[in-house]
């Protein structure tokens, strides 16, 4: 078989995105402006929320969401132990304490049965992560823990849903990423969503230095001498109009991207089901998976090689893989800060050591999937 080179992820962009950049460049309005507003309006409509605010990335979205929900010094925020480090970092930005909760190894999402034991009088909020595009059960979390503010980490979950409820509108705040490994991208970029008017006002001001009047309002208003009032210390977490223009084009393709990935996820499932050492992702009934990544689990007790050796074998044959993500409690900064042992969160530890993401993106063709399947079946032979 002729060797192919298949990256773990690749953005699906082309002439339309290139053409979209011309408008902001030719107009001279390249910072946050009308294209960002158009992108926000489209995103809010697609995700059935009242408000959407484009920001510089999902990490800043999480920071804004936590601040807008009143998280600050002395507060504790529950965070899944298996997620990208930014979920916990955003809590630290608020001078609050991340408290880790183990995950359900079957979904890679937070184990709702483990939440109650982590709640104290200081617990203010929870950040359920819709990992890899599969929604966490937000409605059940709301039912069991109505006292907690819920910030959805939907970095991977644009377009994902449970039934008729899209990600980003089930909790108090939703946070999304448009990094190139996501289904839709603006290079870097993020979005905050909410149905709460007060939270929306806070996010809008905080992302723009704390200003109560936007740059667009100032520049287009009849009184050029008026500057914004600043009633709070804010941040420069804005998105550019060049990114917004790209986002408008990408968002129009979101459902096509997800439908295509669903087709190939089904193909993987059918073709890989007989590999006894490999567990493929399962989607609960009624859930719409966004398939940002296709993350499998390697059972080393049955596999002919250890997970890392399998990943090296695939890499040698041009197939990029990655661990699903990392167990945050095992990273030096948090392990040392809170004196945490790897075994303290066994589900997250297992996911860290044995998960394996295989290529899934919209630039792939059937020959790519067949090539990957062939080499997975040939492991150890």
Image (cartoon, grey):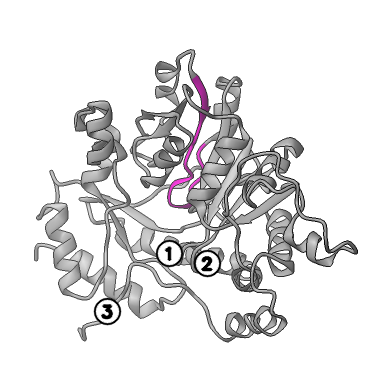
Please tell me the numbered disc located at residue 5: 3
Instruction: Please state, as top left, top right, bottom left or bottom right, where the N terminus lies in the image.
Output: bottom left
Please tell me the numbered disc located at residue 312: none
- Out of 198 and 206, give the one closest to the viewer: 206
**Tags 1 and 2 in contact by the CB under 8 Å rule?**
yes
- Out of 18 and 370, give the one closest to the viewer: 18
Image coordinates for residue 275, horizontal then vertical, percent: 23, 56
Which element is circle 1 on?
loop
Residue 135 inside the magenta-drawn segment: yes
Quadrant assignment, res 35: bottom right
The residue at 34%/66% (across/down) is: 359
Image coordinates for residue 172, horizontal then vertical, percent: 64, 35
The residue at 24%/33% (across/down) is: 335
Foreground tag (3 vs 2): 2
Q: Earlier in the sequence, mark 3 or mark 1?
A: 3
Neighbour class for label 1 at 10 Å: few (<14), some, many (≥20)?
Answer: some
Q: CA distance from mark 3 to mark 1?
A: 17 Å
Foreground tag (3 vs 1): 1
Q: CA distance from mark 1 to mark 2?
A: 8 Å
Which region is colored magenta?
A: 123-136
Which element is circle 3 on?
loop
Q: Earlier in the sequence, mark 3 or mark 2?
A: 3
Image coordinates for residue 21, horizontal then vertical, percent: 62, 80
Which element is circle 2 on?
loop
Image coordinates for residue 18, horizontal then vertical, percent: 58, 84
Residue at the disc numbered 1: 181
Above or below, 324 against 95 in this view is below
Report whether 194 appears left or right of 184.
right
Instruction: Please state, as top left, top right, bottom left or bottom right, where the C terminus lies in the image.
Output: bottom left
Report whether 364 appears left or right of 274.
right
Residue at the disc numbered 2: 185
């Amino acid at each position: 078989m002729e060797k192919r080179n298949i990256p773990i992820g690749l953005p699906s962009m082309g002439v339309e995105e290139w053409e979209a950049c011309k408008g902001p460049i030719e107009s001279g309005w390249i910072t946050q402006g009308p294209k960002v507003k158009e992108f926000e309006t489209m995103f809010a409509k697609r995700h059935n929320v009242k408000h959407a605010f484009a920001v510089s990335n999902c990490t800043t979205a999480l920071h804004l969401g936590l601040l807008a929900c009143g998280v600050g010094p002395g507060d504790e925020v529950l965070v899944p132990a298996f997620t990208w480090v930014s979920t916990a970092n955003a809590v630290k930005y608020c001078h609050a304490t991340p408290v880790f909760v183990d995950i359900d190894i079957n979904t890679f999402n937070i184990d709702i049965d483990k939440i109650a034991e982590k709640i104290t009088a200081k617990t203010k909020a929870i950040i359920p992560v819709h990992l890899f595009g599969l929604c966490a059960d937000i409605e059940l979390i709301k039912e069991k823990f109505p006292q907690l503010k819920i910030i959805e980490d939907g970095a991977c979950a644009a377009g994902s849903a449970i039934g008729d409820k899209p990600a980003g509108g089930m909790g108090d705040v939703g946070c999304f990423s448009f990094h190139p490994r996501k289904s839709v991208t603006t290079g870097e970029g993020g979005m905050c969503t909410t149905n709460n008017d007060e939270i929306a006002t806070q996010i809008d001001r905080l992302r723009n230095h704390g200003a109560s009047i936007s740059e667009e309002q100032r520049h287009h208003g009849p009184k050029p001498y008026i500057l914004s009032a600043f009633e709070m210390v804010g941040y420069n977490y804005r998105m550019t109009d060049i990114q917004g223009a790209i986002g408008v084009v990408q968002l129009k393709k979101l459902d096509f991207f997800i439908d295509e990935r669903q087709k190939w996820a089904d193909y993987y499932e059918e073709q890989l089901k007989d590999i006894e050492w490999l567990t493929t992702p399962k989607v609960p009934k009624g859930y719409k998976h966004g398939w940002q990544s296709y993350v499998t689990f390697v059972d080393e007790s049955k596999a002919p090689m250890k997970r890392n050796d399998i990943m090296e074998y695939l890499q040698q044959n041009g197939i990029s893989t990655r661990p699903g993500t990392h167990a945050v409690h095992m990273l030096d900064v948090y392990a040392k800060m809170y004196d945490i042992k790897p075994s303290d969160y066994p589900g997250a530890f297992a996911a860290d050591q044995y998960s394996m993401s295989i290529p899934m993106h919209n630039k792939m063709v059937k020959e790519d999937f067949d090539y990957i399947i062939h080499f997975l079946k040939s492991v150890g032979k």
